[in-house]
Image: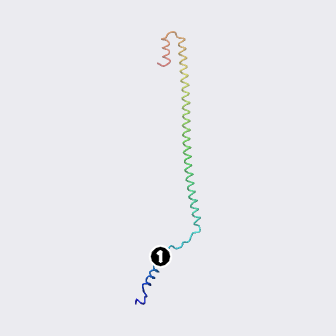
Amino acid sequence: MSHLKNTGFADRISSQQEAKKAMLAKFKAKPTVQDPDFDKREEQRAAELEAVRAARAEAKEKARLEAVARQEAIMAVKRAERKERKQVEAAEMRIRKEEKAQARDELRALGKTSNSKADRAHQWASLWGN
């Protein structure tokens, strides 16, 4: 029976090589069909990505500008408060100076009109609330 199958060493080696080739051919990558819009889709994805990046950058810049505007508004309010406070302090200082000058003038007037030191001291004390 072995004669009928013709199974010599060379035949077995060649049939093994053919089986191996068939097995490898089964796992070999088949040629794929290239999508004609592949490049267009890549460009579209790139454009979408760029648009998203630009939108994010714009939002970030807008937020930064708003923060700067808020800081400037806060600083303007502080400057206005400081200016108003200085004006009030200046007005109070003028009033104190005028009161002091008026008291000094009254003391001078007392010194000229009153003859006794005790009268002048008494009047001077009453001016200052003592």
- Pointer 1: residues within 10 angstroms few (<14), some, or many (20+)? few
Q: Nearer the viewer, residue 8 or 86?
A: 8
Residue at the far front in the pictured view: 10
Is residue 53 or residue 77 the one in the foreground? Answer: 53
Question: In terms of secondary structure, where does tag 1 sit?
Answer: helix
Based on the displayed image, in which of its 4 quarters is residue 79 positioned? top right
Figure label count: 1
Classify 27 as above or below 71.
below
> Camera-side residue: 98 or 26?
26
Judged from this view, the residue extending furthest toward the top is: 115
User: Residue 84 location, x and y as percent?
Assistant: 56, 32
Quadrant in which residue 47 is drawn: bottom right
Q: Position of residue 58 (x, y in %)?
A: 57, 51
Q: Which residue is mark 1?
A: 24
**18 shown above or below 97:** below
Quarter that holds the N terminus:
bottom left
Q: Residue at x 47, y 76 (%)?
A: 24
Place of residue 8 in the rendered image (x, y in percent of width and height, measured from the top left): 42, 86
Residue 19 position by quadrant:
bottom left
- Please say if 75 is above or below 38: above
Q: Position of residue 33 (x, y in %)?
A: 56, 71
Q: Amino acid at mark 1?
A: Leu
In the rendered image of this protein, does residue 95 appear above or below residue 40? above
